[in-house]
Image (spheres, coloured by chain):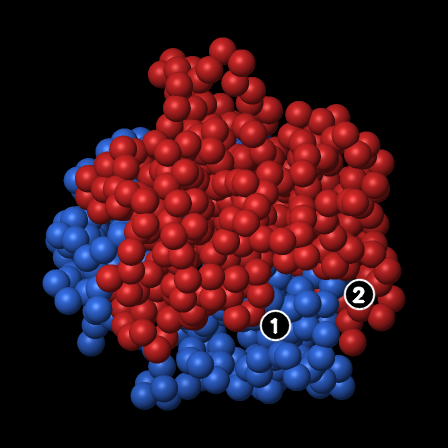
Chain colours: A red, B blue
């Protein structure tokens, strides 16, 4: 009804295989207009002009599939930032800990969280808790593809190993940032009280005050829209009051453990690529006719991190 | 199952009548813990110690009720920032324009949008389009209750007339900011092509690049969780492909037009109050035991704007 004239839009791009965050999405258009074509074409053109070498295939050993009744959520893990938690989560997954798990919490504009309601479920060789991995030392060769604009919460922000990240050089520390779709480890009061048995994804405004207070282990690179629409829990903190309200998780798997036919092969645009730099600049200053006042700024949680089906 | 021990939490506070944004919400707790009590108690205590005079009752003449099958969404309008659009939207509402309207778009991490699919519906005395009200001149007595921390997108941010707002003194202009739940006017390519027949609310990370490009007319103060879970549209830009996918809107009404028995009387904490200042500081530096590294910062779209049922 509203897209008869459209040939190339954010959504159709997604169908064509390029998933973008909302920052790359279109303005609140009122009706099908030519500008939509122009607007998204800017992104599509930028990506279409990229070289194959500017994309990196997701490592199946560090990719999780969270299979819901409604489809698959793909999570890229960040072993560079949380090596022990990532290893532990994979051990939990491989022990079948998350088979028949559930979405147990959905708090509006905050987090959607999942875990295993069956408290007797074996952890296998995994540990229940681990020492926190809230941040890490800035290594000599650690690269941050920086964004130049000021950030409310950190001295420097940008992208490290494909993830939104922040740095404080005075402290010599860097950490992943709580952007939309980023996945973290639920914990109790103690810093070392989490281990990965309960995980959450940010479903609203980036709760950056949680940065350096939670071990972040990755981000949802596809399927976040399946998690974000979970009915908000009416219990405390958005937890569901009854098991019946929970959405079942069929299983979680490490991509490497599935046969090729069951995998969702994706590749991500390298954040150290020329195309990514061009993309960031195009988002800082939107030149499409729809925009009357380009922001001239770009926030770390507003930057698109393009992912598309891997070729071949 | 998870809240047996809890006495006072974010969610129960909401039931008790204080709706907070996620910024005030609890950390991604793993299990019911005493700290939850402490954490939210900090907010509850702050609000409990407030004076009645620190709250302002929402003006029924500038409050909209969007009635969905699942409940009511309450929107506070911002005539101070968009006087002509607010007047026009009220004229549309009073002409019955939004009776049997629909949610027509839900784009993940961006906006949920509504309008009247019936293209023959009369606008009544309202206009289809208006001159843009993207920003306004900073008046001599215009107050901005500032946040002190840097903002990525604007030189100054804070709260004006109860809404998140930004300023550029060099330009002599101020404007409302695209935070979660803020409501804007969909438009076509021309700046003056919107009028209020299609409205949207932000449902994810604040798309601040839209600031000064859209006329913002208010914010959802209650019921955002009804809008945010709308299944994402699979058409272009998150528009629904078929009418069947749309969620019906029973009606939109100006609060003043309903009898007292049908109203949702709310009051909002004044942003120029001492309690609000205390609340902001408590959010900048979370002192609850759960937090190991207080942020020491607070973003304009992370600040809670408490609303509760009006007394009497």
Query: What kind of element bears circle 2?
Result: loop
Q: Could you say which is closer to the camera, residue B178 or residue A82?
A: A82
Measured as percent of width and height from the top left, residue B93 is found at: 57, 79
Residue B93 visible within the image: yes
Residue B84 visible to the viewer: no
Q: Residues within 10 Å of mark 1 (few under 14, many from 20)?
A: many
Residue B114, numbered label = 1
At x 71% / y 84%, what residue is drawn? B118
Q: Chain of mark 1?
A: B
Label 1 residue SS: strand
- Could you tell whether A42 is left or right of A180 in the image? right
Q: Quadrant of residue B8?
A: bottom left
Residue appearing at x 40%, y 57% in the figure: A96
Name the residue carrying label 2.
A32
Total labels drawn: 2
Q: Position of residue A267 (x, y in %)?
A: 68, 41
- In the foreground, A106 or A65: A65
Q: Nearer the viewer, residue B63 or A226?
A: A226
């Amino acid at each position: 009804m509203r897209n008869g004239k459209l040939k190339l839009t954010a959504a159709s791009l997604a169908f064509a295989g390029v998933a973008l965050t909302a920052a790359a999405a279109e303005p609140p258009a009122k009706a099908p207009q030519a500008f939509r074509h122009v607007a998204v074409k800017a992104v599509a053109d930028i990506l279409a002009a990229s070289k194959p070498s500017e994309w990196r295939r997701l490592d199946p050993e560090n990719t999780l599939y969270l299979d819901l009744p409604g489809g698959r959520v793909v999570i890229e893990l960040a072993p560079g930032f949380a090596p022990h938690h990532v290893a532990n989560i994979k051990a939990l997954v491989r022990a079948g800990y998350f088979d028949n798990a559930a979405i147990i919490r959905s708090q509006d504009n905050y987090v959607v969280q999942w875990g295993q309601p069956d408290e007797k479920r074996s952890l296998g060789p995994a540990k229940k808790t681990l020492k926190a991995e809230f941040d890490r030392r800035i290594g000599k060769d650690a690269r941050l593809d920086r964004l130049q604009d000021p950030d409310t919460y950190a001295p420097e922000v940008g992208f490290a190993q494909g993830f939104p990240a922040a740095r404080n050089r005075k402290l010599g520390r860097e950490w992943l940032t709580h952007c939309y779709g980023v996945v973290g480890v639920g914990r109790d009061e103690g810093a070392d009280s989490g281990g990965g048995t309960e995980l959450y994804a940010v479903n609203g405004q980036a709760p950056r005050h949680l940065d350096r207070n939670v071990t972040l282990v990755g981000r949802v690179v596809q399927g976040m829209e399946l998690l974000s629409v979970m009915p908000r829990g009416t219990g405390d903190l958005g937890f569901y009051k009854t098991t019946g309200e929970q959405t079942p998780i069929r299983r979680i798997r490490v991509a490497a453990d599935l046969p090729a036919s069951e995998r969702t092969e994706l590749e991500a645009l390298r954040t150290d690529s020329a195309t990514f730099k061009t993309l960031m600049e195009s988002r800082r200053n939107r030149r499409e006719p729809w925009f009357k006042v380009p922001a001239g700024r770009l926030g770390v949680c507003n930057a698109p991190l393009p992912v598309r089906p891997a070729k071949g």
